[in-house]
Amino acid sequence: MTLAGLTIDRVETFAVPLPTLRAFGVAGGSIAVVGKPSIRILVKVTAGDHFGWGEATPIPAWTYETRESIVSTIDGYLAPAIIGRPAWDLDGVTSVFDRAINRGFSIGAPLAKCAVDMALHDLLGRALGVSLGVLWGQRRLEEIQLGWVVSGQGPDEVAAAVAEGQSLGYQAFKVKIGLHSEAEDLAIVAAVRKAAPDAPLWVDANQAYSVAEAVRISKALDGLGVTAFEQPLPANDVAGLQRLRDLSAVPVALDESLRHPTDMATFVRLGAVDVAIAKVQRSGGLTLSRRLCQLAEDSGVRLMGSGLTDSDLGLAASLHLFSAFGISTPVDLNGRQFIDSVYATGNTVKVANGAAAVPTGPGLGVEVDEDLVRSLAT
């Protein structure tokens, strides 16, 4: 099979409601509500006889892209820009996307761009009959350790939340803070530590604090054995993050600040980053995420992994990326904890005992029930 003659014929979007299993919130607001479906935008890209699937996770409480804007951006701007282009030209597609929806003061519709980029990777792997690790020539791990997320529970409820994760084999925990007062946030972290005395534990503030608050909180977190303090400050507070790196008692991990590889380069030059979070959707897909991760690795910056409550397509994409760069510390890929990927046929992404096996099937390694997707799409 040769990829040279494959040109992109069609790009389709589907807004699919998926069952919500548990409630989930971040400092910016609610993400998942039990009894209310969680919408995921699935994208199918077709090139001749071949196709691939991708995913976008609209979370207005986390970023500006909504389910409506993702669909209209892909259908009205990204898809027309790439129809007729070679399906293998991932770098060229990235450049075309930047002209169709300019970066401006951010990366420019990263969730929408990610869904198409992910689908193109899936298409290329399927066309060649190889997984993404084989396609890239880069697969260092066969299994990725996952963290169980504690979010929205009060201190008195934490023990039950931790016990639920432990019953499913999870041995690491991530706590969302910034949802309550400073004292209550720390009480929740302390309750997690009490319930899991020896577990790897890290926290994510989702930009909730000032420098002074973060420094004060970091001292308490250090006493609780917290290994990383994720995104305590606003994403664009470069000077504040530079100061915080020197003052924090716990290593500071950057997530929302690292939207593009050039952001990574800026923080490295300024000496303002201890730990970089790899997140496929935040960075506009696998193409840019690989560049960002390679830059971090080459610069001696430690990599951690995270996701956006992805369903199984996004979960698989992240597993391939984290495997490629050997991210062996537990990661926040929490989709299975909060939503049910009913469109995925068979057990193509295997999660057991708090760990996920990196898929070995062609492309992303996820088989999609297209008839079900079309029937569910709103």
Image (cartoon, helix red, strand yellow):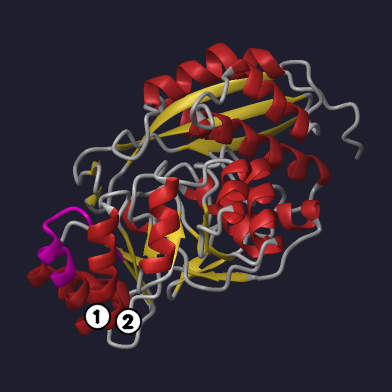
Q: Amino acid at mark 1?
A: Arg
Horizontal relation, residue 97 to residue 91: left or right: left
The residue singled out by tag 1 in the image is 193
> Which residue is at 91% across, 40% downward?
1
Q: Using a 10 Å C-alpha cutoff, classify the residue at mark 1 as few (fewer than 14 neighbours), some (14 to 19) or many (20 or more).
A: many
Between 162 and 231, the residue placed more toward the observer is: 231
Q: Is residue 162 above or below residue 11?
A: below
Q: Is residue 6 above or below residue 171?
A: above
**Number of marks in the rendered image:** 2
Q: Amino acid at mark 2?
A: Gly
Q: Position of residue 113 (x, y in %)?
A: 57, 30
Quarter holding residue 199: bottom left
Q: Is residue 208 above or below residue 38?
A: below
Q: Quadrant of the C terminus?
A: top left
> Which residue is at 37% across, 72% downward?
250
Q: Position of residue 348 (x, y in %)?
A: 57, 56
Q: Secondary structure at mark 1?
A: helix
Q: Which mark is residue 225?
A: 2
> Which residue is at 54% across, 46% downward?
313
